[in-house]
Amino acid sequence: MKRPDSASLLLLGLAVLVAASSRAGMPLFLACLALALAALTVATSHLSLLLRRSRWLMLTMLVMFGWLTPGTPLPEIHGASQEGLLLAAESLARLLIALCTVALLLKTLAPNQLVAGMRSLLAPLALLGISRDRIAVRLALTLEEVEAARQPDDRQGGIAATLSLPTAAFGAADACLGVLAGTLLLGAWLT
């Protein structure tokens, strides 16, 4: 079986993100734990980088929800409310689900595959007169500059003269991933 198209993997990642983050309570925390374990196992370096870059956002969310939400005061934690800390935990779990999903996608897809997948998924924008190629080129250039900034010693003279995106034919693996993504989205919508 051939490797699935990058658009199918992006669609599956989006479906996992929507299905997992639409939960509340214990199912949300279990989905967060499962995705965190998967990302720690498969994409440790990508996840650690994303977590390091998001640490201030996470701290701000904890303080804003935990200490500024009215509710039942906790005597053990001065100024925090029980409802606020629960709201902070759910919001942080949703953010962690998003970060884990992105880390897994970044580990699975090379930058050019990521751009090609986004280009394929943006095909319906042509009906609105929006050029998906322009968006794909901008994304490719942005990703190239991000990579160049991460490794300043390896820069090879800037932007490439030509930009090529891989193309793939729709196959059985793509159909299976599409059915799985559809099932996840339908399940998230119905529950």
Image: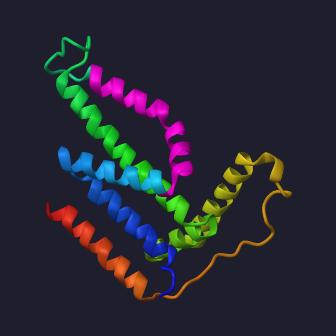
Give the residue drawn at x 64%, y 63%: 140
Total numbered labels placed on residues in the image: 0
Residue 7 point in image, percent of width and height: 47, 74
Image quarter in which the C terminus is found:
bottom left
Please state the horizontal and vertical placement of residue 11, each as a whole percent of the image: 40, 69
Residue 46 colored magenta? yes
Task: Give the side of residue 140 with respect to residue 128, left or right.
Answer: right
Tell me, yes or no, if residue 128 can be seen here: no
Quarter residue 110 falls in: bottom right
Residue 31 position, x and y percent, is 28, 52
In the visual, does 177 lie left or right of 69? right
Tell me the chief SS of the magenta region.
Answer: helix
Note whether 154 is above or below 57 in the view shown: below
Q: Is residue 49 magenta?
A: yes
Q: Toward which corner of the image does residue 74 lie, by quadrant? A: top left
Task: Please indicate, yes or no, whether residue 155 appears anywhere in the rendered image.
Answer: yes
Left or right: where 23 falls relative to 159: left
Residue occupying the point 35% across, 57% down = 17
Q: Is residue 153 above or below residue 171?
A: above
Q: In this rendering, is residue 19 above or below 73?
A: below
Residue stretch rendered in magenta on the structure: 42-67
Q: Residue visible at 26% across and 39% down?
A: 90
- Colour style of the rendered protein structure: rainbow
Counting from the top left corner in percent of width and height, residue 77 is at: 26, 14
Q: Does 24 sit left or right of 144 as displayed?
A: left
In the picture as drawn, the residue positioned furthest to the front comes out as: 41
